[in-house]
Amino acid sequence: MTAKVRAVGANTPNGTRGNRRRTGMLAVAGALVLATVAACGGGSNNSGSQGGFKPVKQTGGALTVWVDASRMDAAKLYQQQHPDVKMNIVSYDGDANGSNYLRTKVSLFNRTRKGWPDVVFSSQNNETTWAVDAGFTAPLNKGLIPQSTLAGWAKGANTPCTVNGTLYCLRNDLAQTVLWYNAPLMKQWGYQVPQTWEEYQALGEKVATEHPGYLVGSAGDTWAPELYMWPSKCGANQITGPKAVTVSTGSANCTRMASLLDTLIKNKTMSMSSVFSSDFDKNEAGKILMLPGPSWFGGALFQGSFKTPAHQIAVSPMPKWSADSGSTAGNVGGGTWLLSAHSANLKAATAFLTWVTTSDDYQAKLAPGYPAYAAAAKNWLAKQASSGYFTGDISAPLQAAADEVWPGWGYGQFSQEAVWAATVTPQLTAGKSIVSLLPAWQTAIANYARAAGYKVTTQ
């Protein structure tokens, strides 16, 4: 059985794009909802055996799974392959764009003591910041899933799911950043793919003079800090505890990238339009020389939105700063699966959760994003390579980047994208530089974090 629900005011999911364009949550409202959930006593169910988790009476019955539009194929395929499992498949917005639909419904279920789904997909990576305290999500590494299975995820992939050493969700896909570029243009113009950010800036300055109108990047989306400040190891979002964050936007790691962006924005090789806007699609999509972006840019943007012809787009690792020992990546998106601590059908729920995150039948053959499970990712990459769309080896840089996401940028309950959109973007549009806005950005992050109940340390 398949049902559909929709959060009032939430954007309808639109495949990969709908899940990635997260404009964030309203921090004050989020903090109030969290307080309400905690006050309802939802967390009291996380006491007892199995490291603090006491399962409810296991009565079996239908398995209720909540998915967004992009994950509907996964649930339907599982039902097809397991006809003996009775399933209620519910379509919802996947918490896209920070709708908080899941958290609001869990608050209601905690009050009425019924209605919780068994397994839920979320397009957000920060659900554990409220779901653990609400007593909603079950600990997965306390006897439910073998450690031998859990060891198969990419390095650091399940960090957003881990609270005080306990794993409360599983990462579905990664969105590690790499450098996408037009290989024929690079060759035609005699340019080398930059290995360092210094080379990247120098090439951007050269392009501005020799090929005006062409782009080496875009900083026009709300995830710009995740694309550029995160890989630069800017300490704007260092989550140091369940409710603690250190914010430092004035360090050299922040100012070096801010200065680079200011230079390229000024010479117009760095776009300030959203890559999903009609303006970008019409006027700039055909002028891309390079574009730092997450793993999903290849299919969703170049092959999908931009309709870039085959045999043009290639992938390289993110540049590194010459003073750094190695490359670091950021992350823009990805999603998680949560298993309800209230499930009366843990055996079936765990079986589905394991299958949907590790099975090649879904993750390698059907999934739109780069799988977080390493073995499935390898086969997913083989499928991309066999399509004949990309040029050169895309597997090596994407695999390397999956293990290079800088761990110093955390997944707080507040949204960095919302902060950037409210604080930096309007001022950039008004002609201010990013370097000059770094203090205001730090203040805004601190304010959003405090509103969400965080203890904030600034440097």
Image: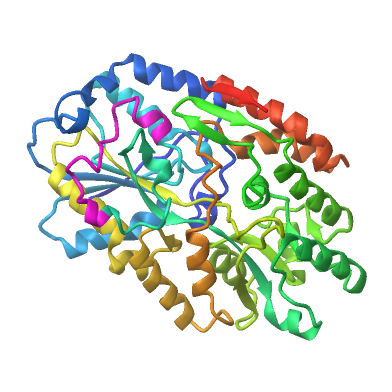
Tell me which corner region of the image, top left, top right, bottom left or bottom right, holds residue 278.
Answer: bottom right
The answer to which of 411 and 307 lies nearer the viewer is: 411
The answer to which of 390 and 49 lies nearer the viewer is: 49
Q: How far across and down, in percent of the image, does residue 2 sit?
A: 27, 50
Side of 334 relative to 267 (left or right)? left
The answer to which of 296 and 133 lies nearer the viewer is: 133
**Residue 105 seen in this snapshot:** yes
Q: How many marks?
A: 0
Query: Could you tell me which residue is drawn at 18 percent across and 44 percent down?
Result: 144
- Is 140 a magenta residue? yes
Query: Could you tell me which residue is drawn at 58 percent across and 72 percent down?
Result: 303
Tell me which corner region of the image, top left, top right, bottom left or bottom right, holds residue 118.
Answer: top left
**Residue 283 seen in this snapshot:** no
Image vertical order of residue 81 relative to residue 420, above or below: below
Outermost residue, right side: 209
Q: In which quarter of the image is the C terminus?
A: top right
Image vertical order of residue 74 relative to residue 60, above or below: below
Image vertical order of residue 37 relative to residue 172, above or below: above
Side of 202 relative to 60 (left or right)? right
Q: Which colour scheme is used?
A: rainbow
Q: What stretch is highlighted in magenta?
A: 128-149
- Prevailing secondary structure of the magenta residues: loop
Side of 261 relative to 293 (left or right)? right
Q: How far across and down, in percent of the image, does residue 311 sit?
A: 61, 83
Q: How far across and down, in percent of the image, does residue 34 sit?
A: 42, 22
Side of 457 relative to 37 (left or right)? right
Q: How far across and down, in percent of the image, does residue 27 sit?
A: 56, 26
- Is 77 a magenta residue? no
